[in-house]
Image (cartoon, helix red, strand yellow):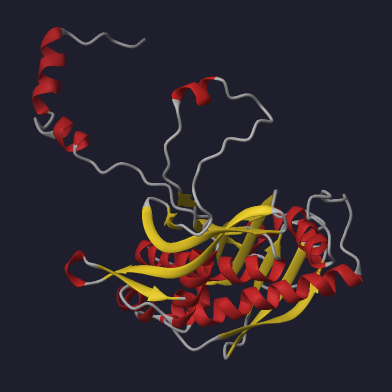
Amino acid sequence: MSRVLTQEEIDALLASTPADAGARADRSAPVITYNFRHPDRVSKDQIRSLHFLHDRFARNATASLSAYLRTTTELSIVSVEQFAYSEFLLALPDPTAFYAVSVAPFDTLSALELNPGVAFAMIDRILGGSGESGAPQRALTEIEQNVVDAVVRLLLEHLTETWKTVTDIRFQIHARETRPQMLPVASWNEVVLVVTFDLKVGEARGLLNICIPASIIEASGTSLGQSWQHSKRDRTGVEEQWLNESLGLIPLIVSADLQTSVRTRDLVNLKPGQVLSLGVPSEIDVNVRVGDIVKFRGRLATTAGRAAVLVNHKISTVAGGRREGQGR
């Protein structure tokens, strides 16, 4: 039969326990879960560098895609994460536009996946459609895959150009499939970096995924972390082209200033369909504004039955704030 401890025995046990035992327990480090099947082979600094690197790729590729597809296209980076290759495959739609990509001079493959929603929109645009027909629930045909190939080659050209700041590698199409599981790219448990982009083509929207083996990142060494420190300060020719083309797509409000005086009675009695005579001769020069800034001088004219302004002088601001006119 068990015996109940007396108060003296309880006090003796408590006295024999070290006073800082509880403190040591409180100071113990928190438990951190570690997945031995999928170790983190790429450091957080390298992931940040990859994010910056592929953000540049997205900005450069946006202008080229817009010009090639003849519609507004937006490509923006969403995330850079490391997974087992099997996890990457299981997250992909099936069927989809899936490419095995060679990475010369490395003896390994990477992968590129283009969601069907934007793939079909691209095909429709390239073949003369509006790009708004929607994505059918089927795999791409051989002809449709050939059309998408051209877009993927364009993307890989920009990817190669972007990676030149890190290491001299070349991305090229190796093979393609509509079912990702049918195209072996990496071993099932290999650690890969998955760069996910949000791609908008007109009104269609979907994801673009680029899968890069961790071995390529490891082979790049410290150059991956160092390259973006320099490249972020030096604008490349591709970035310059992207900037110029993007500025050319920005809509601007252009207006002509025509100053005259109108009686209040005429304005009050004005009705739809009536013509309001401004009393201004057609030979008078007017200011042409771009936004709120006067940039040109021109003369009133008509074209195709519509009112227009014939620009004959450009007004530029020179040193000291003085404006100088240039002949047409």
At a point 10% along the width and 33% down the height, the residue shown is 20
**In terms of image quadrants, where is residue 318?**
bottom left
At a point 90% along the width and 71% down the height, the residue shown is 142
Nearer to the camera, 199 or 67? 67
Relative placement, left or right, of 285 versus 62 is left
At a point 65% along the width and 69% down the height, the residue shown is 67
Asked whether residue 39 is in view, the answer is: no
At a point 55% along the width and 81% down the height, the residue shown is 160
Taking 198 as reference, is 97 above or below it?
below
In percent of width and height, residue 100 lies at 71, 75
**In terms of image quadrants, where is residue 53?**
bottom left
Taking 30 as reference, is 247 above or below it?
below
Taking 65 as reference, is 158 above or below it?
below
Nearer to the camera, 124 or 23? 124
Q: Quadrant of the N terminus?
A: top left
In percent of width and height, residue 122 lies at 76, 62
Relative placement, left or right, of 14 versus 75 is left
